[in-house]
Amino acid sequence: MDRDRGLDRLLPLRPVEFHILLSLSGGERHGYGIIQDIESRGESPAPDVGTMYRALARMAEAGLIEAAERRPAPEIAERRNYYRITAVGTRVARAEAQRLASLMKAARLGGLLTRDLK
Amino acid sequence: MDRDRGLDRLLPLRPVEFHILLSLSGGERHGYGIIQDIESRGESPAPDVGTMYRALARMAEAGLIEAAERRPAPEIAERRNYYRITAVGTRVARAEAQRLASLMKAARLGGLLTRDLK
DNA sequence: TCCAACTATATGCGCGGCGCATAGACTTTT
DNA sequence: AAAAGTCTATGCGCCGCGCATATAGTTGGA
């Protein structure tokens, strides 16, 4: 259990934090790209840029994500700051997903979800 | 579409608001009872009482819920303030449940949910 | 060519939601 | 008789959020 010490302190995640971890679980991304990724999933409204950059700093501080030194192909000035999800971040994201899943089960039983989305 | 006018303004719901609507979709309840209901679903931590009573006032103001005059069997002084979900509240809760369900689908595809909860 | 729109990050500002503490009153349990 | 539980309510202060703005490089169309 030692590796789970203090994870509860971070749960439940704020909606924007779960969105970020979910996006990063698909690969390394930068702040602006994460917003576009969330938008592409139909989430509306997508997180504000101010919310995003502050959330990234907070989550890096907490160890959920970490900076990914990414110097892509071209040697041109790269403005993007890439991040990747950490092992801790993955565990927290899984725990949050489980929590939301059981909430969805309750919603289904409560008649708020007529049928499951495929 | 007229009956849906302005509902987007309320979405996405705050977590505590969805919990309240879900609880009330199971019948009329009072603030303290809603907290116990949420606790009984394993949600931890359950919403603070301050958060609860303020959320109820806010949601009644918005028309998502309404006061339910409830004078139960005994004529003794009844301290409880019961609420019921409105038609608008039900539509909003369903829309939010759909949003969360599609988020869960994304989480499943992203490998955050190994298998569905039964 | 020039200007608008887009990409990309960052931060000050002010509002508001939240947890915490406290208050008050009644009820049940030990 | 005291303690714990029930029930609502609100003041306080923190902090997360949306909005606006700053900065600057890139892309695309009139």
Image (cartoon, coloured by chain):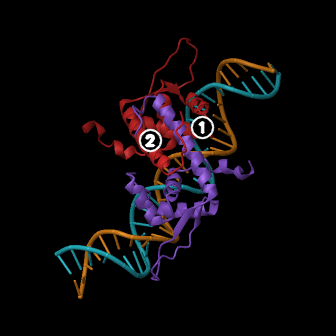
Chain colours: A purple, B red, C orange, D cyan
Q: CA distance from mark 1 to mark 2?
A: 18 Å
Residue B97 screen position, x and y as percent:
43, 38
Of badges 1 and 2, nearer the viewer stands 2
Instruction: Give the crowd class for mark 2: few <14, some 14-19, many >=20 residues within 10 Å.
Output: many
Q: Amino acid at mark 1?
A: Glu
Which residue lies at the image location 48% right of the left edge and 65% below the top edge?
Answer: A31
Name the side, left or right, on which B75 lies relative to A36.
right
Q: Is residue A12 visible?
A: no
Q: Quadrant of residue A59?
A: bottom right
Work out which quarter of the rendered image holds the N terminus of chain B and state it.
Answer: top left
Secondary structure state at the residue bearing disc 1 = loop
Q: Which residue is mark 1?
A: B43
Q: Amino acid at mark 2?
A: Ala
Residue B102 disc label: none
Q: Earlier in the sequence, mark 1 or mark 2?
A: 1
Secondary structure state at the residue bearing disc 2 = helix
Which chain does the residue under circle 1 lie in?
B
Residue A34 screen position, x and y as percent:
46, 61
Q: Quadrant of residue B79?
A: top right
Which residue lies at the image location 40% right of the left edge and 61% below the top edge?
Answer: A36
Say above or below: C12 vs A7.
Answer: below
Q: Which residue is mark 2?
A: B101
Residue A61 screen position, x and y as percent:
63, 63
Q: Which of B26 and A6 lies nearest the eye of the viewer? A: A6
Which chain does the residue under circle 2 lie in?
B
